[in-house]
Image (tube, rainbow, N blue to C red):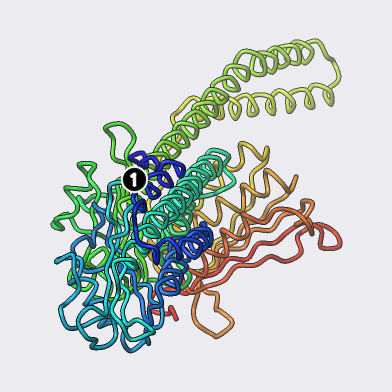
């Protein structure tokens, strides 16, 4: 982001103003105390609009104007630059006159003077208006227009000099407020980037893209945040995570390869949607559903992982050039975090494979050899025994040892093979998650399927169910200290309102959910379910007295969403 222009030194401004006032009329000199008091009252505020409101009121009171207005220009580089005014702040102007006031200020911006026969809000005699540009450094950010002297007379040169000095001080106040606002905004985006990186790499987030979408929506003051990744088996981009206050229906939507935006995004270029009605987000939702939208690539180096999209409500302010820059920086940092998380998962999978190899070697070099040696000792003892009962028992023991050796060798062979690809469908993906969880847990959770899971549950709902299962198993491993876990996927369930649904139940005998503990994982589960029109909650677990936790996650089946 470009560095903000340095603010003028207040002492230099005061000196310049003093030089400009030398030799002026006695009338102007007599009004200097009022000017100084007006300058002192400007100060700064929490935002630019507050300061502008103070400026327009102070200027009107200083020269006795009945009405005043400030038209704020769009900053250079903003999407709406050249499309009217970014803001209009008025004093003494009725709400009904605001639109006309904006037109007059826009005319004043183009001609540097107001119309010859009109002033904001009303027709006035010639000379009953006064316009002064407002500048921050070398930039003219707006125009101040005063109309209708309370004494009925025209504005004088003395009035103009006073307002020009006030405008200089106003520029300084606005400059300070802009710097403070930009600093706060930049800090928010930086803090958001750090939070996303920590959440994705710590594993507490459960689903990296979902965390990125939610944080981007929050930082951009948007109605919806979306992460799109390259479509499996296609050239388009698919929405894999959607963050919104209410169900958007965008989850699983595809931005097709034929869209002009796709090649630009995959080339690492941002896309700004200026007219959502003609170019709706993702080319799917109803025109006009969302307002200003932007899409920035999730890129790390030369690699584009996907796209981060945000959209505001209809009639909301467009994204500024600063916001677009900050969003691009946030997306780049989020992409690095996702790449690092992917590398972390690869290292964990490699560690599992190495551990499998070590176990296989130990079984072959130690266990099998010892079992084989024990069998030979028993066979020798059998030959030396004269008692038929003893010989028979030893023979059975040798047979059992032979069978055990064969089973161990089968296990060794399985450990030495690359883990097989999980069969397609929800059932296979659930099996894969449960098998993967057995490594850190130290035991195999039980798994039960009810109903034709693969036939009834569509891919989008299935993807969320698998992610919810991963989150629940991860919580059981990291926080519950469970020794027993039961997983049930029921495609014959029904929601409270009677709609057919798929229900995931993960029950354990761990320590349960602490009353004052973190519940980010449970919040993630609830958000996923609610995005599909379902719900998520928890109940007592499997241990005696209900100790432990039972997580229940459910979502309606296709065609049954609310």
* Residue 310 lies in quadrant: bottom left
- Relative to 279, 67 lies left or right: right
The image shows residue 128 at horizontal and vertical percentages of: 26, 80
Residue that badge 1 annotates: 328
User: Front-most of 80 and 521?
Assistant: 80
Crowdedness near tag 1: few (<14), some (14–19) or many (≥20) residues, C-alpha within 10 Å: many
Mark 1 lies on a secondary structure that is helix
Q: Relative to residue 379, is residue 65 depicted above or below?
A: below
Q: Relative to residue 354, is residue 246 depicted above or below?
A: below
Identify the image quadrant of the N terminus: top left
- How many numbered markers are drawn? 1
- Relative to 379, 19 lies left or right: left
User: Front-most of 55 and 456?
Assistant: 55
The image shows residue 504 at horizontal and vertical percentages of: 57, 63
Q: Residue at x 64, y 52 (%)?
A: 446
The image shows residue 228 at horizontal and vertical percentages of: 33, 53
- Relative to 501, 64 lies left or right: left
Q: Residue at x 42, y 52 (%)?
A: 178
Identify the image quadrant of the C terminus: bottom left
* Residue 157 lies in quadrant: bottom left
């Amino acid at each position: 982001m470009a560095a903000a222009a340095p603010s003028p030194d207040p002492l230099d401004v005061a000196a310049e103003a003093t030089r400009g006032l030398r030799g002026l009329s006695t009338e102007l000199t007599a009004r200097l105390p009022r000017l100084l008091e007006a300058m002192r009252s400007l100060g700064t505020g929490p935002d630019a609009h507050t300061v502008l409101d103070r400026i327009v009121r102070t200027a009107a009171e200083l020269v006795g104007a009945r009405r005043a207005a400030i038209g704020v220009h769009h900053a250079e580089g903003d999407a709406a630059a050249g499309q009217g005014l970014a803001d209009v702040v008025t004093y003494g102007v009725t709400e009904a006159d605001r639109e006309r006031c904006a037109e007059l200020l826009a005319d004043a911006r183009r001609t540097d003077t107001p119309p010859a026969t009109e002033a904001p809000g009303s027709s006035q005699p010639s000379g009953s208006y006064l316009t002064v540009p407002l500048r921050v450094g070398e930039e003219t950010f707006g125009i101040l227009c005063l109309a209708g002297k309370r004494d009925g007379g025209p504005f004088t040169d003395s009035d103009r000099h006073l307002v020009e000095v006030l405008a200089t001080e106003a520029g300084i106040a606005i400059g300070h407020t802009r710097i403070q606002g930009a600093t706060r905004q930049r800090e928010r985006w930086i803090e958001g980037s750090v939070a996303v990186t920590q959440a994705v790499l710590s594993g507490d987030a459960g689903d990296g893209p979902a965390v990125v979408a939610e944080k981007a929506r929050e930082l951009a003051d948007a109605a919806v945040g979306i992460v799109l990744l390259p479509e499996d088996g296609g050239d388009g981009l698919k929405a894999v995570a959607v963050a919104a206050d209410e169900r958007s229906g965008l989850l699983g939507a595809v931005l097709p390869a034929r869209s002009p935006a796709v090649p630009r995004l995959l080339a690492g270029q941002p896309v700004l949607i200026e007219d959502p009605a003609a170019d709706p987000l993702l080319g799917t939702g109803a025109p006009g559903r969302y307002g200003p939208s932007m899409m920035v690539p999730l890129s790390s180096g030369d690699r584009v992982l996907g796209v981060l999209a945000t959209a505001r409500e209809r009639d909301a302010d467009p994204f500024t050039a600063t916001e677009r820059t900050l969003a691009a920086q946030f997306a780049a940092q989020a992409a690095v975090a996702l790449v690092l998380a992917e590398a972390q998962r690869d290292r964990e999978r490699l560690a599992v494979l190495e551990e499998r190899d070590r176990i296989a070697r130990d079984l072959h070099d130690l266990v099998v050899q010892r079992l084989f040696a024990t069998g030979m000792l028993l066979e020798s003892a059998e030959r030396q025994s004269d008692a038929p009962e003893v010989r028979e028992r030893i023979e059975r023991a040798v047979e059992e040892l032979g069978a055990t050796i064969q089973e161990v060798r089968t296990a060794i062979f399985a450990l030495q093979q690359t883990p097989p690809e999980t069969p397609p469908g929800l059932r296979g993906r659930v099996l894969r998650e449960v098998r993967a969880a057995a490594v850190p847990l130290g035991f195999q959770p039980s798994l039960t399927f009810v109903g034709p899971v693969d036939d009834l549950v569509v891919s989008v709902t299935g993807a969320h169910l698998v992610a919810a299962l991963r989150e629940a198993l991860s919580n059981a491993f990291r926080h519950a200290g469970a020794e027993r876990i039961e997983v049930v996927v029921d495609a014959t369930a029904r929601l409270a309102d009677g709609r057919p649904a798929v229900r995931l139940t993960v029950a354990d005998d761990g320590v349960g959910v602490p009353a004052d503990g973190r519940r980010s994982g449970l919040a993630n589960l609830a958000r996923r379910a609610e995005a599909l029109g379902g719900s998520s909650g928890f109940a007592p677990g499997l241990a005696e007295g209900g100790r432990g936790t039972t997580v229940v996650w459910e979502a309606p089946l296709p065609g049954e969403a609310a």
